[in-house]
Image (cartoon, grey):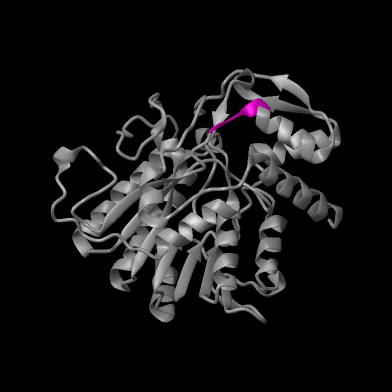
Amino acid sequence: MKYLVTGAAGFIGFHVSRHLLERGDEVVGLDMINDYYDVNLKLARIAELGVDSSGIAENQVCRATSLPFSFVKMNLGDKESLMKLFAEQKFDVVINLAAQAGVRYSLTHPEVYVESNITGFLNILEGCRFYPVKHLVYASSSSVYGANEKMPFSTADSVDHPISLYAASKKSNELMAHTYSHLFAIPTTGLRFFTVYGPWGRPDMALFLFTEAILKGEPIQVFNHGKMRRDFTYIDDIVNGILRVAERPPQPNPDYSELDGDPSRAKAPYKIYNIGNSSPVELMDYIHAVEEGLGKKAKMEMLPLQAGDVPASHADVTDLMEDTGYKPSTDIKVGVRAFTDWYKSYYSKS
């Protein structure tokens, strides 16, 4: 199979690309490599996949030396270049993980989210429309649940009250995907990710920030005074779920009725899944796991809940487990230790 993985220099996209290559698939990775966080970390991920960063040029396909991997630096907002890539490469499956991430950043840079998460996603849909693929899998987010208070979060729930523009952009992606599934019979599956963590993670995420601060002897910022619960999900479990989903495109369901009240399904070849650990962890337990992994105690600065954040998340993944056999299995202490070991190794070489 030939896959297009967008956001391939990002945290999840890098791991998805690596797993696809390990099992023998061909992968074209796409990323604009913006400076939202450390560009060198993004380039290091691409180097792990066999592409020399010194040879990367805008909109040019750069091939790895030893793996069936190619990389192209491209902005999804550049529709002409993206359509040319679709025409030339003839993808079987698209896994769209490119997006402007970050809830808090969306409070100060809203225009970036419209350009990347909405216009960019529209161009992906157009590529799948004019150069048909077997399946489009795309990243949504648990943030779409916004002000919902019923736990666990279910894809059958209404998600009409987002509390950040980032969340609104992800909800928009789901609506756009349904439209294209309905009009053009493109099989699309959206995955609502729940707090993904692990080696090669993002520097703006809590685990990275905690580890960095603790090692420097600086206080960590603990929001909502530590009274947070998150459905922390290890990267390998996430990737396993993504690949299982990618292999089973949704089928049209002519018997579906909107009266069922389940917006995650449709008459069109369309599906939405939660993808998480389905076992929420207290933030303080998460911090203790970081302390254990580093062998060092944290200094803590207790702060109120930040704008755009929710106090708890909990994924109902029943349908994903039933449909694909997905079964997250990584204990929080094991996963956090894998990250802290990677962090110390990676930055000791920097």
Above/below status of 258 relative to 237: above
Q: How many marks?
A: 0
> In the picture, residue 270 is in which quadrant?
bottom left
Above/below status of 329 relative to 52: above
Above/below status of 192 relative to 45: above
Q: Is residue 73 visible?
A: no
Residue 307 percent location from the top left of the image: 52, 25
What's the residue at 74%, 36% (across, down)?
A: 290
What's the residue at 70%, 31% (across, down)?
A: 287
Residue 187 percent location from the top left of the image: 29, 62
Q: For this rendering, which residue is in front, 206 or 244? A: 244
Is 343 positioned to the left or the right of 186 in the image?
A: right
Q: Is residue 59 magenta?
A: no
Q: Quadrant of the N terminus?
A: bottom left
What's the residue at 36%, 42% (across, down)?
A: 171
Residue 88 percent location from the top left of the image: 42, 81
Q: For this rendering, which residue is in front, 189 or 79? A: 189
Q: Quadrant of the C terminus?
A: bottom right
Above/below status of 311 relative to 348: above
Residue 21 percent location from the top left of the image: 57, 72
> In the picture, residue 24 is in which quadrant?
bottom right
Q: For this rendering, which residue is in front, 233 or 91? A: 233
Magenta range: 280-284
Is 251 positioned to the left or the right of 40 in the image?
A: left
What's the residue at 24%, 40% (across, down)?
A: 262
Q: Is residue 160 visible?
A: yes
Q: For this rendering, which residue is in front, 37 or 248? A: 248
